Image (tube, rainbow, N blue to C red):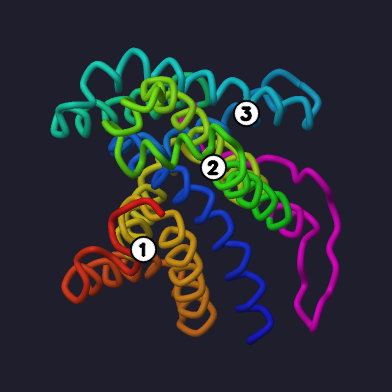
């Protein structure tokens, strides 16, 4: 049982980390609480489904199209819906929820409300330490970790990545030094949505999809970011694996434990708010 918990918690944590880092990045840099973040995750999965099941397209081509289209949607949403209202937090929250509901209804109109599934990118499985692991699960883990490492290296090593961190620390001072903060915000939105799209694409073959899947994912995402500290990339990654392993432990240990995932996330979030309101790693982007 312990090897199974370790492996499945690692895979779940990697997907959670992709979502949480994207959310924390846009919040930490642009101070945008994008509640439509998991709607992009859902959109990426459904675009793959539409391309393969409804249009008969090659699976790998469908994944590439999904990432491009989802990222383009993120740019459109940022320019038309988020940027005009980002100075008003209540309006921004309502706007991003509205965007998520629009995505939900668009999927309802095009793909329906039935549960659907996507074929795995690679078939087969291997057995490690007595645990049966699908090749798709290993692929999901490998790509998720690789993408996370690439983003972290970009932020810490690339010149523009350092500009992003400078805006996160003090946007006004960065603008005085010649950093185009609006361009930084747009690039960060693109990275954020791309991370959500990669998470959606990688998890799609492992889940049963429906047009409400963004909702529980959003609750989990908010719990992770509050536990780790809003705007903290390090905190988001740590909290992703903490929550993933807690959920996996409960699922393996308790009958019907899968139905307790949301309750566990909310309970951990409330406990952190009481004990350490700023989260495990504070509220500033490292």
Residue 250 in picture, x, y percent from top left: 46, 79
Q: Residue furthest front?
A: 177
| N-term-proximal mark, 3 vs 1 | 3
Q: Secondary structure at mark 2?
A: loop
Residue nearer the viewer, 217 or 118? 217
Residue nearer the viewer, 264 or 109? 264
Residue 220 in picture, x, y percent from top left: 38, 56
Q: Answer with left or right where residue 22 lies relative to residue 5.
A: left
Q: Secondary structure at mark 3?
A: helix
Instruction: Confirm whether residue 247 shows in the render.
Output: yes
Q: Residues within 10 Å of mark 3 (few under 14, many from 20)?
A: many
Residue nearer the viewer, 267 or 160? 160
User: Disc 3 to disc 1, how far (Cα)?
Assistant: 27 Å
User: Mark 3 or 1, which is nearer the eye?
Assistant: 1
Q: Residues within 10 Å of mark 2 (few under 14, many from 20)?
A: many
In the displayed structure, 129 sits above or below 125; it is below
Pointer 2 residue: 209
Screen quadrant of the C terminus: bottom left
Q: Answer with left or right where residue 184 lies relative to residue 195.
A: left
Pointer 3 residue: 67
User: Mark 3 or 2, which is nearer the eye?
Assistant: 3
User: Disc 3 to disc 2, how far (Cα)?
Assistant: 17 Å
Residue 105 forms part of the magenta stretch: no
Examine the image and state in which quarter residue 51 appears.
Answer: top right
Q: Secondary structure at mark 1?
A: helix
Pointer 1 residue: 228
Residue in the image at 44% along x and 30% along y: 189
Examine the image and state in which quarter residue 91 appears.
Answer: top left
């Amino acid at each position: 049982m312990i090897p199974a918990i370790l492996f499945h918690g690692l895979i779940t944590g990697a997907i959670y980390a992709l979502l949480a880092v994207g959310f924390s990045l846009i919040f930490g840099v642009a101070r945008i609480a994008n509640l439509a973040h998991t709607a992009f995750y859902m959109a990426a999965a459904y675009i793959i489904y539409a391309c393969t099941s409804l249009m008969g397209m090659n699976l790998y081509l469908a994944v590439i199209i999904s990432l491009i289209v989802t990222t383009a949607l993120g740019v459109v949403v940022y320019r038309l819906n988020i940027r005009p209202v980002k100075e008003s937090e209540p309006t921004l929250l309502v706007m991003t929820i509205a965007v998520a509901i629009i995505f939900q209804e668009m999927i309802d109109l095009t793909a329906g409300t039935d549960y659907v599934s996507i074929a795995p990118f690679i078939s087969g499985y291997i057995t490690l330490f007595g645990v049966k692991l699908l090749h798709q699960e290993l692929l999901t883990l490998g790509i998720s970790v690789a993408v996370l490492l690439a983003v972290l290296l970009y932020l810490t090593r690339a010149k523009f990545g350092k500009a992003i961190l400078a805006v996160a620390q003090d946007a006004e001072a960065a603008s005085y030094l010649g950093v185009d903060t609006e361009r930084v915000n747009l690039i960060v939105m693109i990275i954020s949505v791309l991370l959500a799209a990669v998470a959606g694409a990688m998890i799609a073959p492992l889940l049963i999809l429906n047009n409400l899947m963004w909702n529980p994912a959003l609750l989990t995402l908010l719990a992770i970011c509050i536990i780790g500290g809003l705007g903290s990339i390090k905190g988001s990654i740590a909290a992703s694996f903490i929550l993933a392993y807690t959920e996996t432990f409960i699922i393996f240990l308790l009958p019907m434990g899968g139905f307790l995932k949301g309750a566990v996330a909310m309970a951990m979030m409330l406990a952190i708010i009481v004990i350490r309101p700023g989260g495990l790693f504070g509220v500033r982007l490292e």
